[in-house]
Amino acid sequence: MKQWLVTRKQGVLDKYRSVILEKAIDQPKVEIALAGKEVTDYNAGQLEIIVKAQEDKIIQRYKNSTLVVLLLALGIY
């Protein structure tokens, strides 16, 4: 039973990481296009840094919104 829960939890975490990564890849593509550049103008290292920065922003946004919802539920905010 415990192993099943661990496996299930890992599956859910992997799913959310995958969704966050997809968003982190899509959003810089839009920003690059709005800047009038192409994705090919950047090398792999630069793109990796851009995607990682976007991924960190998304994760931070989710953490902040979760905290606000928790505070609202407790009547503190």
Image (cartoon, rainbow, N blue to C red):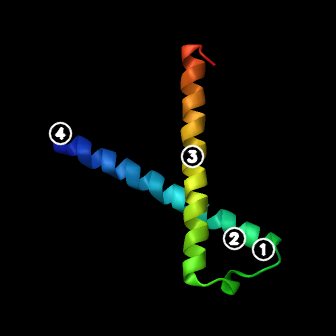
Crowding at mark 1 (Cα within 10 Å: few <14, some 14-19, many 20+): few
Q: Name the amino acid, label 3.
A: Gln
- First reached walking from the N terminus: tag 4 or tag 3: 4
Of label 2 and label 3, which has the lower sequence position? 2
Q: Report how far apart the C-alphas of labels 4 and 3 lie in the structure.
A: 30 Å
Q: Badge 3: few (under 14), some or many (20 or more) residues near its Cα, within 10 Å?
A: few
For the residue pair 23 and 65, the one nearer the viewer reads as 65
Q: Are marks 2 and 3 in contact (CB under 8 Å)?
A: no
Quadrant of residue 70 in the image?
top right
Residue at which label 2 appears: 29
Q: Amino acid at mark 4?
A: Lys
Q: Secondary structure at mark 1?
A: helix
Q: Are marks 4 and 3 in contact (CB under 8 Å)?
A: no
Which residue is disc 4 drawn over? 2
- Amino acid type of the residue tagged 1 in the rendering: Ala
Going from N to C along the chain, the mark reached first, 4 or 1, is: 4
Q: Which residue is mark 3?
A: 60
Foreground: 45 or 16?
Answer: 45
Q: First in sequence, mark 3 or 1: give its number.
A: 1
Pick out the residue farthest to the top. 75
Q: Nearer the viewer, residue 12 or 65?
A: 65
Foreground: disc 3 or disc 1: 3
Q: Residue at x 58, y 67 (%)?
A: 51
Q: CA distance from mark 4 to mark 1?
A: 47 Å
Looking at the rendered structure, the secondary structure element under dot 2 is helix
Say which amino acid is labelled 2.
Answer: Lys
> What is the C-alpha distance between the residues marked 3 and 1?
24 Å
Question: Which residue corresponds to mark 1?
Answer: 33
Label 4 to label 2, Cα distance in Å? 41 Å
